[in-house]
Image (cartoon, rainbow, N blue to C red):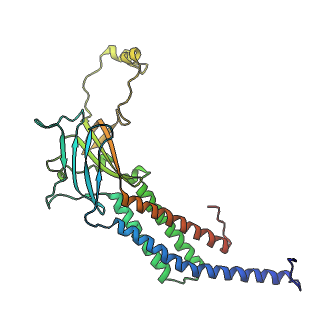
Amino acid sequence: MAAWAYPPLQAADLEREADKALANELEWLLRSLQDSLASLKEGLQECAALLAPRDPGSTLVLSSLRSESVKGFVTRVGTKIVKGDIHLRLSSLPPPRGASSTHLSLSSSPETPELVLDQLVSVRNLVHQSLDVVDVSTWTGDPLNASFISGQLRLLYETITEARQTLKGDEGDARGNWWESSASQNIFNPQLPPYLSFHLSIFDSALVLQLRTLEPNTPTHTPTAFTADISLTGFSLRDKLFGPRHRPHDEAGDVFTWNGEEVRVKEKIRVESQDPSLMAVMAKLTALQHEVSKWISALNVLMGRDDTD
């Protein structure tokens, strides 16, 4: 079948008809995006509901694998940990006299400070910001203005991406530095033992507990002339005889400022518990991020923009 038109169009007419067809496609896309934004808003509202405080909350087991080092649970309601009961058996933390383990329990007193998960607060705020962007795109401005909608979609994509990355917890800044954001001793009843850091964070939609026993960073002895001489090459006599020691954990030998004091980490243990609600939020945010990315690409094509990014 012939693929040409008769009578043939002039070049100027052909270009004008092509521009007209492109404009019609762009208008159709902008109108259809309003329905798509309504569906996206429903997904964001589902994420907000999963992050909202709702009794009885999520009870998560926090226990070490193949050992009795950590055994217990915590209960998360919204962005807060409202209940917790954990038993520790650490070689560097002797239990109280007459007990077989060190017991950590969140205080139920009304005066007790709240144990808030800052990452979840950030994720919740970003989800609400995304909902605001959708409302502005729907009810404010011209929904058929391609430049306006394009800018709103990019802002929406960036906000959803930030929420997803915060929930994933890839970056250390998102999870917080343990020496700056360890739980307060006053949260527990009885209070935490001295030089014990209790740090909760979110990593890949799981609740992660990191416990560290600490010691003051004070010199224990002054090296003699002999020990100074044999360490000039960077190896001690023991290292020459038996080889270098293996670090018991990745922070061994490092110095941190914790509660205004320089400390070293004696023992470190990490346990995690997958949170089904947070996994659902992650799945929804990933799907929404992908959808907005497709809308941006389609809009760029019809607007004649470079979509290489």
Query: Which residue appears at 35% of the width and 69% of the height?
Result: 49
Tell which residue pokes out farthest to the bottom in this image. Answer: 7
Query: Which residue appears at 29% of the width and 16% of the height?
Result: 224
Q: Is residue 94 left or right of residue 10?
A: left
Q: Position of residue 23 (x, y in %)?
A: 68, 81
Quadrant for the N terminus in the image: bottom right
Q: Compared with residue 28, is residue 105 higher up or lower down, i.e. above or below?
A: above
Q: Is residue 83 left or right of residue 176?
A: left
Front in this rendered view, residue 276 or 53:
276
Q: Compared with residue 65, is residue 139 higher up or lower down, i.e. above or below?
A: below
Q: Position of residue 123 (x, y in %)?
A: 39, 62
Q: How many marks?
A: 0
Quadrant for the C terminus in the image: bottom right
Residue 143, image quadrant? bottom right
Q: Is residue 87 left or right of residue 64?
A: left
Q: Compared with residue 292, is residue 237 higher up or lower down, i.e. above or below?
A: above
Tell which residue pokes out farthest to the left in this image. Answer: 98
Q: Position of residue 183 (x, y in %)?
A: 25, 50
Query: Which residue appears at 38% of the width and 24% of the height?
Result: 245
Q: Compared with residue 96, is residue 113 higher up or lower down, i.e. above or below?
A: below
Q: Say whether residue 213 is visible.
A: yes
Q: Say whether residue 145 is visible.
A: no
Query: Which residue appears at 22% of the width and 52% of the height?
Result: 84
Q: Position of residue 73 (x, y in %)?
A: 25, 50
